Image (cartoon, grey):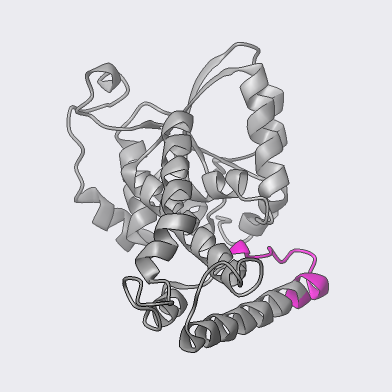
Amino acid sequence: MTSNRIGFKQFINKLENNQDISIVIDSNILIANFDELHSSHEVVKNFLEQIDEMANITFYTTVTTKAEFLDYQRKRFLTECLFDLIDEYSGDVHLSLLSKSAISLAKARRNKRQHDEEKKSEKDPDHEFDAKTAYLSDNEIREIKKKFRARDIEKEDGWLKICDIFLKQKLLDQEILIDEFCEYLSPHKEEQKEIFVNPYVDWKKTTLISAETGMGFSDSLILNILLHTKINYILTLDFDLIYASAVSADNKQVLLPDNRIKAFKSVLKG
């Protein structure tokens, strides 16, 4: 199987100054770039800055990618604000004993996850620290949310007020950020018609791509729309997307960090 994987250094070396180039960018790249806690933050940030200085790069993405990015940021901001409620803002925000207890319990669980993840990284140099362990899951957020009243009751601040103060504007700002960073692929946009091979996208092919390698549908959607365009590159950190690209999109080039290339040499050999 011929490799269609290109490491960051190799891509930079082949890039020509002022070259016009289009790249489909995955949500995990956007997350790593804008979240300093992410294990690949420095690698991704430096790569994006380098290629931006050298060439005229246009990043394309999908609404699926946008949803994944904003959902990650939602969990991040809610985690940060909830933990701050029992620490930094404990005197300014009025919480019930039940809500305080739920937040403290979730924080203890989060801290254990982080500790376990750090231990894995110490034992295995190739282990990628998972930034998601720093944030609460939907289930954990939901359990905390159940301990709040929706609206303010006497001296107890409601969940809607918490979201309005600590989440709303931050999440709206993140949407502006990603909208400015990327262009959204759509065959219905007149200015993008030359990018697409066909005037329509066969969304049913998403199922076929997923079935070929067992990858998730979100990643299949991204790969499917890439295959409907003349864009040659996709930038990702995702194992399944890199794997599936070798099988279902071998005519496209996958850009990934140099230290991840070796992980695919044996598994995709043949």
Residue 137: x %, y % from top left = 48, 73
- Is 248 rendered above or below residue 24? below
Q: Is residue 151 magenta?
A: no
- Is 104 rendered above or below residue 162? below
Q: Nearer the viewer, residue 120 or 69?
A: 69
Residue 46, image quadrant = top right
Residue 111: x %, y % from top left = 67, 78
The answer, for residue 91, to whether it is visible in the render is: yes
The residue located at (39%, 63%) in the rendering is 161
Query: Quick one: which residue is furthest to the top in this view?
Result: 18
The residue located at (59%, 83%) in the rendering is 104
Residue 239: x %, y % from top left = 54, 58
Left or right side of 162 for 39: right
Residue 68, image quadrant = bottom left
Left or right side of 143 for 41: right
The answer, for residue 245, to whether it is visible in the render is: no
The residue located at (43%, 77%) in the rendering is 155
Residue 59: x %, y % from top left = 47, 30
Range shown magenta:
119-132
- Is 258 rendered above or below residue 75? above
On-image quarter of the C terminus: bottom right
- Is 192 rendered above or below residue 266? above
Q: How many marks?
A: 0
The residue located at (40%, 56%) in the rendering is 164
Query: Quick one: which residue is furthest to the front in this view?
Result: 154
Q: Is residue 123 magenta?
A: yes
